[in-house]
Amino acid sequence: MKKEHFEAFLTANEKRIYHYVLSLCSNEQDTLDIVQTVFIAVYQNLERIEEETALAYTYKIAHNKCLSFLKQKSRYVNIEPDKFNSMQDKNLNYKEPDYTVLKNAIASLPPRLAAVIQLQYYEKMSYKEISTTLGISIKAVESLLVRAKRILRKKILQDKEK
């Protein structure tokens, strides 16, 4: 497309693109911003755009800009500053979790199973590192972990019932 034809193209299609973006964003101010970036992108790529496909190209850019904008917008919390005063501080009543049941259950495991749990969850070792440390195969590590977790689950559930 030639630069001389851009202004006519903009005038002819601005409302169509605006309504398309508005249907995706549903916010007039955001829509105006996105439409502006769409036509800037079209203008920057004029020499690559053919006149026959210019409208389709513009719709595609509008679609992609809307998706990018909505994805970015979803990452932010949109709360008015005065509402923060009325929010409760959830950390005021925070209590450290009680892990005594879990610690007792791990202590009651056979030494080999307790060692695998210790290395996996507390030492953050991989299966390969555990197998090297204990001198067993990776499959044996997997098997021991499954067995240890099953026993721990039973013991913890029994302690909760009491």
Image (spheres, rainbow, N blue to C red):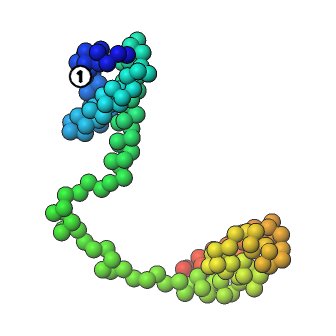
Circle 1 residue: 15
Q: Position of residue 159 (x, y in %)?
A: 58, 82
Q: Position of residue 65 (x, y in %)?
A: 37, 35
Q: Nearer the viewer, residue 48 or 26?
A: 48
Which quadrant does the C terminus fall into? bottom right
Q: Position of residue 96 (x, y in %)?
A: 43, 83
Q: Residue at x 58, y 82 (%)?
A: 102
Q: Quadrant of residue 55?
A: top left
Q: Nearer the viewer, residue 142 or 155?
A: 142
Q: Quadrant of residue 117?
A: bottom right
In the image, taking residue 41 as reference, residue 107 lies left or right, namely: right
Q: Is residue 109 visible?
A: yes
Q: How many marks?
A: 1
Q: Is residue 11 above or below residue 89?
A: above
Q: Is residue 154 visible?
A: no
Q: Residue at x 62, y 79 (%)?
A: 122
> Which structural element holds mark 1?
helix
Which quadrant does the N terminus fall into? top left
Q: Residue at x 25, y 18 (%)?
A: 7
In the image, taking residue 55 as reference, residue 134 lies left or right, namely: right
Question: Which amino acid, by three-letter code, is at mark 1?
Answer: Lys
Q: Nearer the viewer, residue 133 or 23?
A: 133
Q: Position of residue 5 (x, y in %)?
A: 30, 14
Q: Residue at x 66, y 87 (%)?
A: 107
Spot the residue most to the left.
82
